[in-house]
Amino acid sequence: MKNNIIVSVIMAVYNAEKYLDEAIQSILIQTYEKFEFIIINDGSSDKSLEILEKYAIQDSRIVMINRKNKGLVYSLNEGILKAKGKYIARMDADDISDPFRLENQLEFIENNNLDICGGHYLLLGKKGKINGLNVVPISHEMCTLSLLFKVPFAHPSVMIRKSFLNNNLLEYGQSKYQKAEDLDLWIRMHKCGARFGNVDKVVLKYRVLEESLSKQNGVLILKETKDMLRQFYKDNQQQISLIIKNLPSVLNAEEKSLLVRYIYYRIKKLDFSHIGLMRKIDKKIIFNSILSEMIR
């Protein structure tokens, strides 16, 4: 089995006992089985280690690393360095992967020659209630447009071609942006010519918790995100203009929203040249998209 690994699933764990069983089980029951599951216990002080040891005994695909706390960025880079797979699949200790996630993403990333892909995801509340669906852009072009306003993937939903990271000497935390580490990596991947995409299926249940790191570091993440998105537009204006001129014939709701947000941004610059593109977009999407831009 160790010589037949295609996907390395990487999950960092820090005091995640409450949801850890569900997260682990959702990977172990994947329909695609040629994977290893690298789990880093990042100095947990609760019962996380006890839970991990139980599963490590039961399933030989689990590779467990147990050590003192060194933080998420260090843990992810450590996992990638240890990974034997052709692809890296991210996972968080409080989320739930769809059983077909790895199978669907692997097929999509290989058939479309992508370097990174995610997928749609459900929003999960504290008590396991589904509170919504986040639809993401599908094509490389619309994922690129997304980088003007927001991340095109949920971090724990992504699958990445490991050779792309290695060939371009890329890893997490290589810039001054240490809180929004995922967006920072996606932008640096894009700069190196990465091909982006998202599976047009739900791949993950993403748990929204007040105690999560993203919530705790909200102000810093927001500042870093705004800085990076602003710079991305400055660096990629020509490419963005080309995308707008050659839009895919079919757009999903999120892609339409991104288009409206771009048009509104240009209108504020007194550029009305693309306003006609909004004629076929539902008024509700237009209203909500502009509102999002006004409060951003």
Image (tube, helix red, strand yellow):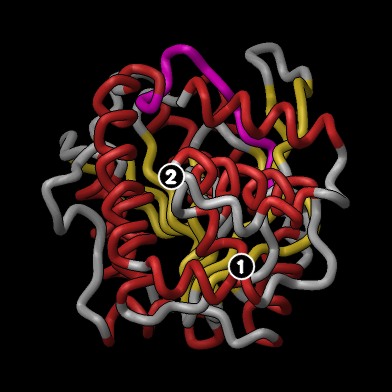
Q: Residue at x 52, y 24 (%)?
A: 294
Q: Is residue 135 above or below residue 216?
A: below
Lateral position of residue 52 relative to residue 203, left or right: left
Where's residue 90, x and y in %? 49, 55
- As rendered, which of 25 and 192 lies closer to the eye? 192
Query: Mark 1 and mark 2: span between their CA atoms?
Result: 16 Å
Lateral position of residue 284 relative to residue 44, left or right: right
- As rendered, which of 19 and 182 lies closer to the eye? 182
Lateral position of residue 268 relative to residue 58, left or right: left
Quadrant of image for the N terminus: bottom right
Q: Report if residue 209 lies within the magenta region.
A: yes
Q: Considering the numbered disc 1 on the image, is that residue within a helix, a strand or a loop?
A: helix
Q: Which mark is residue 269?
A: 2
First to last magenta residue range: 204-214
Where's residue 244, x and y in %? 61, 67
Q: Is residue 125 above or below residue 271?
A: above
Q: Which mark is residue 281?
A: none
Q: Are marks 1 and 2 in contact (CB under 8 Å)?
A: no
Q: Report if residue 19 lies within the magenta region.
A: no
Q: Residue at x 27, y 53 (%)?
A: 231
Q: Quadrant of residue 96?
A: top right
Where's residue 143, x and y in %? 57, 61
Q: Amino acid at mark 2?
A: Lys
Residue mark closest to the camera, 1 vs 2: 2
**Residue 14 visible in the displayed image:** yes
Neighbour class for label 1 at 10 Å: few (<14), some, many (≥20)?
Answer: some
Q: Considering the numbered disc 2 on the image, is that residue within a helix, a strand or a loop?
A: loop
First in sequence, mark 1 or 2: give its number.
1
Neighbour class for label 2 at 10 Å: few (<14), some, many (≥20)?
Answer: few
Residue for badge 1: 244
Where's residue 214, x and y in %? 39, 27
